[in-house]
């Protein structure tokens, strides 16, 4: 009989344990969760943390910059305030020093003083000028009077000779343009300094080098001059070595450095710029320094 092989057994499906399924499910959840967490951290949390750190760093840098800028601005403000205060103090000190120079120079007994109502020890020259005017006494004052346009008259104290001195006089421009003080002068050569005051408020210092030639050393208009004719101004010149200070009504108006003339005669003058000029002088005083 043919061999009849045995009937092969029917394969049966093996059932998985429920516990294993649970474990697999848990493992899947963990893996998926880890992936999601990693994606969240990389895509959301990490950039957010980086942004937060960058924002914090930027804020710190901004705060630092603001603090430094504020400190710098305050330092500049303080420095400016200090500089302004020092400049103001310097100006005040300079003004005080200049007034002190005047006060010290005109303190004590004068070496010479005269009312200028008549002849005195200074030997003021008197003469009639060409074209009228000249140097003369009248009405209790000494006059320097010029009546030719663009000319001046000079009236020297022939017996005077000063080096370092303060020269003061009351000057009244009765009519015309300019009056002034002569100092460190020489009548024969007509070399002298002249401090000139105009009825328009101008002041200037000139060094006369010969007849008709002068070198201007200073010019300005100042408020302390009483302008117009008939006004009396107290005029002062202080010459100390090469420094020359000038004052009007006891107020400083200027100074120069010059070594052209070191000593000589004092005197008075008048200058006709545009019209005949008559200037009256009273109460002259000189202090030797």
Image (cartoon, helix red, strand yellow):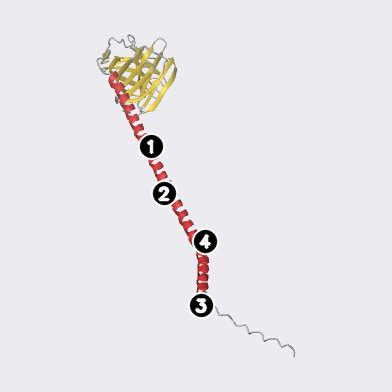
Q: Is residue 192 visible?
A: yes
* Mark before the other along the chain sequence, 1 or 2: 2
Q: Nearer the viewer, residue 138 or 39?
A: 39
Q: Disc 1 marks which residue? A: 79
Q: Residue at x 38, y 19 (%)?
A: 243
Report the disc number at residue 18: 3
| Figure quadrant of residue 205 | top left
* Mark before the other along the chain sequence, 2 or 4: 4
Q: How far is mark 2 from mark 4, CA to CA?
A: 30 Å
View extreme (front): residue:
1
Residue 134 at x, y percent in the picture: 35, 15
| Figure quadrant of residue 193 | top left
* Mark before the other along the chain sequence, 3 or 1: 3
Q: Tag 1's secondary structure?
A: helix
Q: Quadrant of the N terminus?
A: bottom right
Q: Disc 2 marks which residue? A: 63
Asked if the residue under mark 4 is in contact with the one under mark 1, i.e. CB atoms within 8 Å, the reply is: no
* Mark before the other along the chain sequence, 4 or 3: 3
Report the disc number at residue 42: 4
Q: Tag 2's secondary structure?
A: helix
> How busy is the neighbourhood of tag 4: few (under 14 within 10 Å), some, or many (20 plus)?
few
Q: Residue at x 31, y 17 (%)?
A: 167
* Mark before the other along the chain sequence, 3 or 2: 3
Query: Is 246 situated above or below 159?
Result: below
Q: Nearer the viewer, residue 80 or 280?
A: 80
Asked if the residue under mark 1 is in contact with the one under mark 3, i.e. CB atoms within 8 Å, the reply is: no
Query: Is 98 situated above or below 38?
Result: above
């Amino acid at each position: 009989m043919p061999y009849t092989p045995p009937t092969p057994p029917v394969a049966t499906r093996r059932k998985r344990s429920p516990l294993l399924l649970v474990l697999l499910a848990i493992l899947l959840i963990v893996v998926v969760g880890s992936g999601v967490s990693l994606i969240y951290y990389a895509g959301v949390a990490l950039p957010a943390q980086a942004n937060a750190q960058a924002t914090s760093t930027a804020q710190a840098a901004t705060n630092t910059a603001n603090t430094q800028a504020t400190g710098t601005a305050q330092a500049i403000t303080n420095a400016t305030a200090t500089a302004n205060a020092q400049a103001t103090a310097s100006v005040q000190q300079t003004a005080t020093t200049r007034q002190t120079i005047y006060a010290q120079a005109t303190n004590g007994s004068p070496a010479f003083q005269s009312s200028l109502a008549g002849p005195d020890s200074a030997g003021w020259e008197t003469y009639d000028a060409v074209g009228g005017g000249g140097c003369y006494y009248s009405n209790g004052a000494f006059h320097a009077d010029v009546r030719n346009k663009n000319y001046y008259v000079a009236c020297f104290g022939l017996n005077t000779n000063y080096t370092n001195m303060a020269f003061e006089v009351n000057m009244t421009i009765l009519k015309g343009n300019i009056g002034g003080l002569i100092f460190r002068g020489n009548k024969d050569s007509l070399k002298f300094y002249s401090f000139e005051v105009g009825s328009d408020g101008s002041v200037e210092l000139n060094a006369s080098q010969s007849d008709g030639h002068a070198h201007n050393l200073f010019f300005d208009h100042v408020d302390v001059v009483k302008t117009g004719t008939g006004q009396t101004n107290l005029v002062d010149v202080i010459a100390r070595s090469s420094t020359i200070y000038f004052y009007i009504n006891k107020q400083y108006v200027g100074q120069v450095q010059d070594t052209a003339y070191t000593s000589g005669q004092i005197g008075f003058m008048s200058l006709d710029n545009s019209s005949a000029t008559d200037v009256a002088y009273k109460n002259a005083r000189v202090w030797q320094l």
